[in-house]
Image: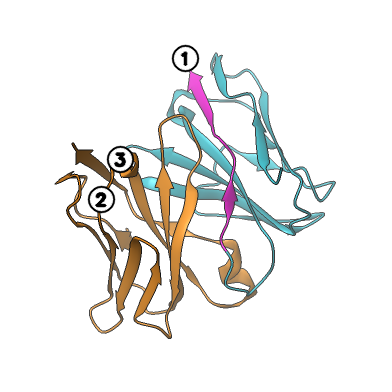
Chain colours: A cyan, B orange
Amino acid sequence: EAQVTQNPRYLITVTGKKLTVTCSQNMNHEYMSWYRQDPGLGLRQIYYSMNVEVTDKGDVPEGYKVSRKEKRNFPLILESPSPNQTSLYFCASTPQAGGLTEAFFGQGTRLTVV
Amino acid sequence: DQQVKQNSPSLSVQEGRISILNCDYTNSMFDYFLWYKKYPAEGPTFLISISSIKDKNEDGRFTVFLNKSAKHLSLHIVPSQPGDSAVYFCAARKGGIQGAQKLVFGQGTRLTINP
């Protein structure tokens, strides 16, 4: 089954404790992205990757890092989480550049930073 | 600034009637528009899309209309069914390789279909 898989689904952590949210897709898509969803703001892009070792900032990159060492994986790293990073996070993958194709989303990771 | 806006946070419609969800955008560089549907505890799932060269796209009960001069698009669902109750997000992207990477989302509209 074609899918984007995120782990964990739920996470409660303390301020300053480094964490990683994993994302994996099995569709051989070149493009992957991370979004956060907050009430009244919709989804906002954090980082994106056009291919292995190619990443760039989205609209709200502060406090986040990413890496793309393999085509299928795109982990999101919070080096020192803060309470304002409490949010619902989605990973997405897209099959090709420039084509009129939609992004496929994972099921989400609800992060609470206390 | 919010480049894609959904001004109605919620909408309630009777089962069998038409649901109309609206979306406005400000950036004339957007060339592709999408609607996503989201159930609680799930990720957004693609529903329907429209290219900027068209003004209408239809898929079963779902039709998206695009009015480029007004920078407005709408999603029509007819007839509405209880399973359509969800949050609907409007999204837009620019053309080109960079544009393909980034979807700009509206705030979402929670649709409730009443039996």
Percent x, y of residue A108: 54, 34
What residue sits 56% from the left and 70% below the top? B99
Label 1 or label 3, whichever lies nearer to me, is: 3
Magenta residues (range): A102-114
Label 1 or label 2, whichever lies nearer to me, is: 2
Q: Is residue A77 visible?
A: no
* Quadrant that contains the N terminus of chain A: top right
Percent x, y of residue B31: 46, 77
**The residue under label 2 is which amino acid type?**
Ser
Element assignment for label 3: loop
Q: Mark 2 falls within which chain?
A: B
Q: Compare residues A81 and A29 and report the one nearer the observer.
A: A29
Which residue does the numbered mark 2 point to in the structure image? B80
Which residue does the numbered mark 1 point to in the structure image? A114
Q: CA distance from mark 1 to mark 3?
A: 32 Å
Which residue does the numbered mark 3 point to in the structure image? B85
